[in-house]
Image: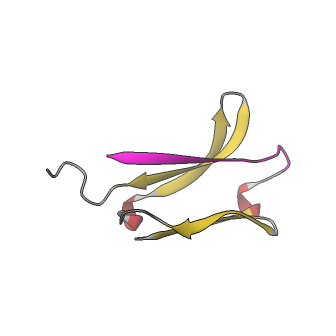
Amino acid sequence: MRTEVFVPITDDVQAKDVTVDIRRSHLSVRVKDQLPLEGQLWKDIRADESGWLIDKEANQRCIIVTLIKRDAGRL
């Protein structure tokens, strides 16, 4: 199972302006000199299987971070 996090950005932001740090229990997104998202995750994720990209969602340019849940499929 996965969860997606959307961080809106302006049209002038390029991938080189973005730093995303995905860890087992922590996520941070830095855009240029700003930190619009940073904090502990509620549950652990599979950081090595998670990732990010820049795309449009509902006509808004965004950084889309995909987090893969650690215990997906277990009851």
What residue lies at 66% left-to-right and 28% top-to-bottom?
Answer: 58
Q: Position of residue 5 (x, y in %)?
A: 55, 48
Span shown in magenta: 1-12
- Image quadrant where residue 47 sits: bottom left
Q: Residue furthest top?
A: 58
What residue lies at 24% left-to-right and 58% top-to-bottom?
Answer: 71
Q: Residue furthest front?
A: 42
Residue 15 lies within the magenta run: no
Residue 6 lies within the magenta run: yes
Q: Residue furthest right?
A: 12
- Image quadrant where residue 48 sits: bottom left
What residue lies at 76% left-to-right and 48% top-to-bottom?
Answer: 9
Q: Position of residue 32 (x, y in %)?
A: 80, 65
Q: Position of residue 6 (x, y in %)?
A: 61, 46
- 30 to 62, vertically: above or below: below
What residue lies at 77% left-to-right and 54% top-to-bottom?
Answer: 14
**Residue 21 appears in view:** no
- Report whether 41 appears left or right of 31: left
- 25 to 61, vertically: above or below: below
Q: Residue furthest left?
A: 75
Give the tally of numbered discs: 0
- Report whether 32 appears left or right of 44: right
User: In this orientation, which residue lies closer to the viewer: 72 or 49?
Assistant: 72
